[in-house]
């Protein structure tokens, strides 16, 4: 088993600060009547997805995401509260203002967690532990006493994030070169950021079941199974190595992809309704794309339900309309042989676009039809910006319920992270 040998890395002090049961704690802070009760924060439009569970609910076995009816079977007195993402944005912005007073290196990782490099500033506040206590005190005074954070400390981002999840809520764990293998013996592969279910299954097929197994794994074996990028990432993870920098949120890089995820109110057996929702999500993503002044070349789709399908497809030319994105998604479904049987249903929908490029850097079309089509899209955008998204809609969406342009479901944090990064980065707006 190798040791961490990078001297520069070993001298860093990286914090990962993670709010405890963030959405639920915010609701309990706003509404004292919810405190000390098992609550589940649900998505809007009457959906039955619990996207966040309170600390009290988690102690009773409620996880997020999960279904409301499943939660009620375990906890009959469960309280359900609709999400209020605007309020969560405000809390996150206050939190960022607090963090930047302790270090200029604060990286927003999701709506409820940040990395901080305090290597050069910790001594200004006594030491790293006193710095953390001062941050917690500021959170209590400026945000609320019911909202707490768990903190992980290490010499890199990988281990700091691992540490923050080991002692929740309101925990504080430090991983050092001296105790890393002791920690690896206590945690599971799935506790690491970057190891999901599929990666874990592939590792298991290689005989790798624990982090210590991964620490002893051969690089050649990992490269053969996972190729260069993923193989090297997993090898470094096994060694506890991560040289990535903490990039301040106000210097965040350009958007590389845009996505939207949606949990339907119930299992949907009507193919037309499912495709109407897909179309509307494509419209939302394309609106965001145009607002960023970009065009895309690739579109992807995921449908989850009685059977799952996912895939992506690219065009030879760049696009920025919801219609073009929708047509690509239709092709993906067709090429994957997706069809609705009598008992089939869809519950989860996700769409995304990638291979983005600044629209101003692309050649203009020589065809009059394309120019007129773009003019129509821009005119519709202006109307929707004035009167609200989806004011003007395609005839295909006649009688279809309007979606709310708010994050929801299982990928909410990713959407929120991008919203906040854009707000603090004028280059993206």
Image (cartoon, rainbow, N blue to C red):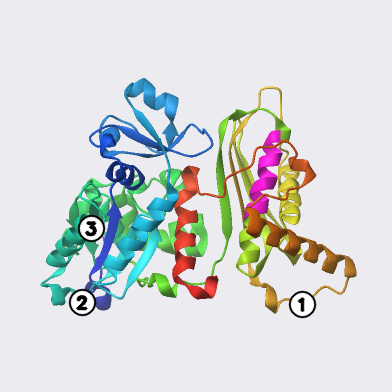
Q: Nearer the viewer, residue 254 or 280?
A: 280
Q: Residue at x 19, y 51 (%)?
A: 171
Q: Nearer the viewer, residue 109 or 5?
A: 109
Q: Residue at x 37, y 35 (%)?
A: 40
Mark 1 surroundings: few (<14), some (14-19) or many (≥20) residues within 10 A = few
Numbered disc 2: secondary structure: loop
Q: Earlier in the sequence, mark 3 or mark 1?
A: 3
- How far across and how far down the image is residue 217, in percent? 36, 56
Q: Nearer the viewer, residue 375 or 104?
A: 375
In this image, 86 relative to 384: left or right?
A: left
Q: Which residues are magenta?
A: 273-284
Quarter of the picture containing the C terminus is bottom right
Report the residue marked by disc 1: 363
Residue 355 in view in this figure? no
- How far across and how far down the image is residue 328, in percent? 73, 52
Would you say the magenta stretch is mainly helix, strand or loop? Answer: helix
Q: Nearer the viewer, residue 397 or 263?
A: 397
Q: In this picture, is 326 found above or below 398? A: below
| Tag 2 near tag 1, CB within 8 Å | no
- How far across and how far down the image is residue 322, in percent? 71, 54
Residue 275 covered by magenta stretch: yes
Residue 207 in view in this figure? yes
Q: Residue at x 73, y 41 (%)?
A: 397
Q: Earlier in the sequence, mark 3 or mark 2?
A: 2
Q: In this picture, is 120 found above or below 307? A: below
Mark 2 surroundings: few (<14), some (14-19) or many (≥20) residues within 10 A = some
In the drawing, what numbered circle is on residue 139? 3
Report the residue marked by disc 2: 121
């Amino acid at each position: 088993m190798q040791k961490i040998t990078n001297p520069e890395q070993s001298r860093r002090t990286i914090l990962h600060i993670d709010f405890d049961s963030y959405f639920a704690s915010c609701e309990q802070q706003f509404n004292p009547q919810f405190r000390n009760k098992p609550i589940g924060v649900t998505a809007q439009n009457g959906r039955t997805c619990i996207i966040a569970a309170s600390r009290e609910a988690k102690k009773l076995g409620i996880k997020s995401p999960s279904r409301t009816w499943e939660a009620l079977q375990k906890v009959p007195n469960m309280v359900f509260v609709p999400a209020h993402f605007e309020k969560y944005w405000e809390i996150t912005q206050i939190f960022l203002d607090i963090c930047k007073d302790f270090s200029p290196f604060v990286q927003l990782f999701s709506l409820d967690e940040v990395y901080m490099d305090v290597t050069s500033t910790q001594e200004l506040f006594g030491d790293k532990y006193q710095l953390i206590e001062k941050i917690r005190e500021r959170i209590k005074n400026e945000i609320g006493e019911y909202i707490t954070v768990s903190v992980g400390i290490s010499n890199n981002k990988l281990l700091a994030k691992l540490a923050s999840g080991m002692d929740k809520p309101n925990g504080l764990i430090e991983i050092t070169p001296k105790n890393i293998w002791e920690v690896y013996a206590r945690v599971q592969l799935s506790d690491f950021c970057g190891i999901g279910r599929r990666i874990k299954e592939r590792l298991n097929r290689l005989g790798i079941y624990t982090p210590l197994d991964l620490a002893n794994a051969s690089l050649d074996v990992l490269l053969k199974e996972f190729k260069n990028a993923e193989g090297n990432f997993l090898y470094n993870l096994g060694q506890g190595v991560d040289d990535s920098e903490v990039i301040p949120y106000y210097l965040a890089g350009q958007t590389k992809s845009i996505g939207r995820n949606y949990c339907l109110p119930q299992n949907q057996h009507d193919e037309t309704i499912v495709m109407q929702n897909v179309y509307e999500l494509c419209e939302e993503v394309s609106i965001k794309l145009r607002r960023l002044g970009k065009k895309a070349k690739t579109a992807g789709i995921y449908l989850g339900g009685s059977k799952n399908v996912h895939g992506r497809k690219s065009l030879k030319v760049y696009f920025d309309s919801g219609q073009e994105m929708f047509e690509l998604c239709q092709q993906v479904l067709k090429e994957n042989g997706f069809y609705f049987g009598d008992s089939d249903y869809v519950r989860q929908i996700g769409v995304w676009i990638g291979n983005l490029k600044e629209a101003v850097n692309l050649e203009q079309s020589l065809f009059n039809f394309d120019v007129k089509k773009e003019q129509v899209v821009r005119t519709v955008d202006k109307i929707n910006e004035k009167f609200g998204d989806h004011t003007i809609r395609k005839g295909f969406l006649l009688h279809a319920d309007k979606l709310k342009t708010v994050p929801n479901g299982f990928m909410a944090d990713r959407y929120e992270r991008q919203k906040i990064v854009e707000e603090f980065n004028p280059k993206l707006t």
